[in-house]
Amino acid sequence: MTAETADVPAPQEPENTREPQLPKEARSPRALAWTRRRHSAARFWREYRTHRAGVFGLAALVLITLAAVFAPLLVGADAQSVTEAPGEAMQSPSGEFPLGTDQFGRDLLALLVWGARISLTVGLLAAFLSVAIGTVVGITAGHFRGWYATVIMRVTDWFLVMPTLVLAIALASVMDRSIWTIVLAIGVTTWPTTARLVRAQTLAVESRPYIERAQALGGGHGHIMARHVLPNVMPLVLAQTTLVISSAILTEATLAFLGLGDPTVVSWGGLLQDAREAGAVSAGDWWYLAPPGIAIAVVALAFTLCGRAVESVLNPRLGVSR
């Protein structure tokens, strides 16, 4: 090597051709998984925003939920008290009481806000219980098949042909009158539809080649159901949950109207029951009947609109109109 060649610097790679040095934690599987989830959530929201009915339903649910969460700040913690009622019994709507008063002199607007807490809580918990039972039954029946699937599907068919409301009334009438009784009564009687849908989707997923490859590589039943089947049926489960919530809220209102709810709490169905007992129907006191009924209808419609939008985004082949 001569002195001239020794002074020549070694060639370097251009700056724009070097591979970027990412931090180690950014290349971890967990970070990559969270990145994919964020991209999926952003893509889901972009698609969801194109459904005007779904956006309207979501906005209505957000407003009602905020009112229910901040009920003590909005209407006061003593709004349900009978001994501290601020008005006279059965007053018509006025500037002081926009929706009038009940038979105890309580503000109906405040009771309506408080009732949103119970109605939404019972509807959500009952729907989650129903969907959880249906998902477990559907996945296991679609995966194991054989005699197990035959027996479990016959039980499902029996629940399907039986009137759901009648079964819920029977359970609620023989158990203690509480919120948890209503949740249990609705949850254990409304799961068969979800089970049928999930089983059909499980059969479709397990007919794909990668399931056979996973079994050939030694994947057990739990691995197949938890890592391959469940993620593929979750979009259907999510859409079904939003649809079940609306029916659960309606069922809760029906049970409370029939006098099977918890008498110590205020719910929309309980307000309708109180109005019936107070003779609001025969007296023509519409302000006692209309607000709880409209609130139940609005929430049920909002959840239905959200469910249809979610179902359309997760399965565009349905072609649900926007």
Image: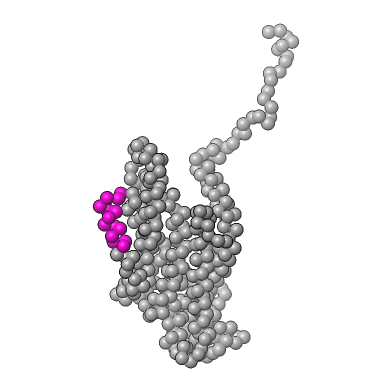
* Image height of 32 relative to 234, above or below: above
The x and y percentages for residue 86 are: 54, 86
Compare residues 11 and 161 and report the one nearer the observer.
161
Residue at 46 percent across and 85 percent down: it is: 275
The answer to whether residue 229 is magenta is: no
Decide whether residue 147 is among the magenta residues.
yes
Q: Quadrant of residue 54?
A: bottom right
Residue 56, given in percent of the width and then of the height, sits at 58, 66
Q: Residue at the spot x=54%, y=70% of the render?
A: 64
The residue shown at (44%, 70%) is 249
Q: Which residues are magenta?
A: 144-157
Closer to the camera, 285 or 50? 50
Residue 185 percent coordinates (x, y): 35, 69
Report the side of 35 relative to 186 (left or right). Answer: right
Name which quarter of the figure residue 192 lies in. Answer: bottom left
Residue 119 appears in the picture as rendered: yes
Please name whichever residue, 189 or 205, is drawn nearer the observer in this view of the structure: 205
Q: Residue furthest right?
A: 4
Q: Residue at image x 39%, y 57%?
A: 197
Q: How is the image coloured?
A: one colour
Residue 214 visible in the picture? no
Q: Quadrant of the C terminus?
A: bottom right
Q: Residue furthest bottom?
A: 283
Name the residue furthest top: 2
Q: Is residue 104 above or below residue 165?
A: below
